[in-house]
Amino acid sequence: MGNRKKLAAEARKAALRTQYFAKLKGVPSSPRKMRYVVDMIRGMEVDRALGVLRFSKKQAAADVEKLLRSAIANWEAKNDRKAEAGELYVSRVFVDEGVTMKRMRPAPQGRGYRIRKRSNHVTLFVDTKTNDEK
C-alpha cells in the first residue's frame, strides 16, 4: 500500500472512532423493502424510533430494531454511561445493495426464468443532540 493511501485509510479509521454506529450485513431481503423501513426512522429520537419499529408490520423492522439497539449499546460502551431519554437520535442511516443470488425457475416450453434473491447491508449512525449543535 502506498503512503498516500495508508494516510487516507488511517484518517478514515480515526474519524470512525469518534462516531457511533452499527452495521448489519447480508440481510436476506431486497434493499428497496429495507429502505421503506429505514426512511421511517431517519432523523428521529432513539426512543421514538424504537417504538415505531416495534409496532411496524414490516419484517425488516425487526432487523432494524435490533441494529438500533446495537448502535445504542456501542454509544454507551464508548462513553461509559447510559444514554438518557431524548439524548440520542438517528443521525444517518443508509442501505446498500449486497450480493444477489441468481437462481433459475422452470418455465413452460423448456424455458427457464431467472430469479434474483437480493440482499442488503444497513449502516446506522446515532449521535447526541449536543454534538450536532456544536
Image: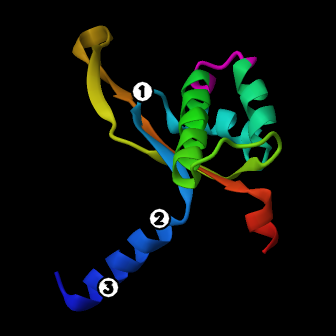
In the displayed structure, 94 sits above or below 132; it is above
* Residue 124 shows up from this direction: no
The residue under label 1 is which amino acid type? Pro
Going 33% across and 40% down the picture, which residue do you hit? 99
Mark 2 lies on a secondary structure that is helix
Q: Position of residue 109 (x, y in %)?
A: 27, 11
Find disc 1 in the rendering and name its residue: 28
Find disc 3 in the rendering and name its residue: 7
Residue 57 among magenta residues: yes
Mark 1 or 3, closer to the camera: 3
Residue neighbourhood size for the residue with mark 1, other residues' Cα within 10 Å, grouped as few (<14), some (14–19), many (≥20): some
Q: Quadrant of the C terminus?
A: bottom right
Q: Position of residue 5 (x, y in %)?
A: 28, 83
Going 71% across and 42% down the picture, which residue do you hit? 39
Residue 111 among magenta residues: no
Q: Position of residue 29 (x, y in %)?
A: 47, 28
Find disc 2 in the rendering and name its residue: 17
The residue under label 3 is which amino acid type? Leu
User: Looking at the image, what colour scheme do you see?
Assistant: rainbow
* Residue 80 shows up from this direction: yes
Mark 1 lies on a secondary structure that is loop
Q: CA distance from mark 1 to mark 2?
A: 29 Å
Q: Quick one: label 3 or label 2, which is nearer the N terminus?
A: 3
Q: Quick one: label 1 or label 2, which is nearer the N terminus?
A: 2
Q: What is the magenta range?
A: 55-61
Q: Is residue 122 left or right of residue 93?
A: left
